[in-house]
Amino acid sequence: MFENLSERLSGVFDRLTKQGALSEDDVKTALREVRVALLEADVSLPVAREFVKAVQDKATGQAVTKSITPGQQVVKIVHDELVHVLQGEGDPGKLKIDNAPAPILMVGLQGSGKTTTTAKLAKRLKDREGKRVLMASLDVNRPAAMEQLQILGVQIGVDTLPIVKGETPVQIARRAKTQASLGGYDVYMLDTAGRLHIDQELIQQAADVRDVVNPRETLLVVDGLTGQVAVEVAEEFDDKIGVSGVVLTRMDGDGRGGAALSMRAVTGKPIRFVGLGEKMDAIETFEPERIAGRILG
Ligand code: GDP
């Protein structure tokens, strides 16, 4: 369905006269193809435009190395710039969980993969860092969501806070905090309620919980296949609640990963993890190189 960018560019450069350096016209022609490739990978138009401009400034006048074709050279410049934009500071997989018990707040829309991701990250902390983790669902409107977290907890060998009917999300968060302190847990993860769309009540609920527990990390879970919507959701959550990182789920799907670039460029928030399936081990630390390769096809 998609034509690979390298193939596309080699076609472009075949039509151009070869010179010692990439001329402005050569670069412009090539970058038109790059822009189409970015749009096909679901990068938003303003982000694609700005990205192409940055690459144009970098590429013009660069000497063409003898060992590679001009097309390959432009692909390399584009690849390096993609990695540069996608890269956050520090190790994205390192969660701030000093000062036990460390609260982690999980936020996002219903269906984004929030509960699954909560359990995946809990398992990772347990298996890789030997942490004792307590999980709690704050989704008081959806008993099924609470039960889902409990079932996942049993499956991965991570404790969940016992479900008590009639409590508010803030009351559950307080109980989780107390239980985590008394029980000697290193981390407690709060899986907040999700809705199909962002609404005031949802945001207020998450903000109230945030104010009670003062989370060390607030991770926003978004469906990586939803492209521009994912970016809008991230802007809204960051604006109202403040997020410390983003988890992009469903990156095992056949989307081209352009949402990652728009996400970084628009919100400035680091992408910390990517979800790669329904299984509890299907999560990886975000690697800019991999996404860059995928966007370029
Ligand atoms: P929530 O409503 O945000 O808590 O979403 P859930 O965690 O219940 O996930 C909704 C559905 O998406 C479930 O069937 C999950 O197994 C599935 N899911 C979650 N993350 C991923 C992922 O990274 N890849 C795939 N393919 N499915 C996922």
Image: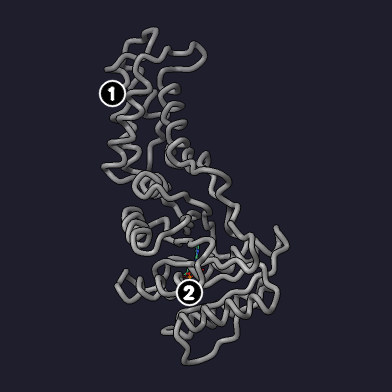
Q: Residues within 10 Å of mark 1 (few under 14, many from 20)?
A: some
Residue 174 on image: x %, y % = 53, 80
Residue 221 found in image quarter: bottom left
Residue 241 found in image quarter: bottom left
Q: Which residue corresponds to mark 1?
A: 29
Q: In the visual, does 23 lie left or right of 122? A: left
Rendered residue at 42%/48% (across/down)? 260
Name the secondary structure under disc 1: helix
Query: Mark 1 or mark 2: which is in front?
Result: 2
Q: Which residue corresponds to mark 2?
A: 212
Q: Amino acid at mark 2?
A: Val
On-image quarter of the C terminus? top left
Rendered residue at 35%/37% (across/down)? 37
Name the secondary structure under disc 2: helix
Comparing 71 with 100, the one in front is 100
The CA distance from mark 1 to mark 2 is 55 Å
Label 1 CB sits under 8 Å from any ligand 1 atom: no
Residue 45 on image: x %, y % = 27, 43
Comparing 57 with 34, the one in front is 57
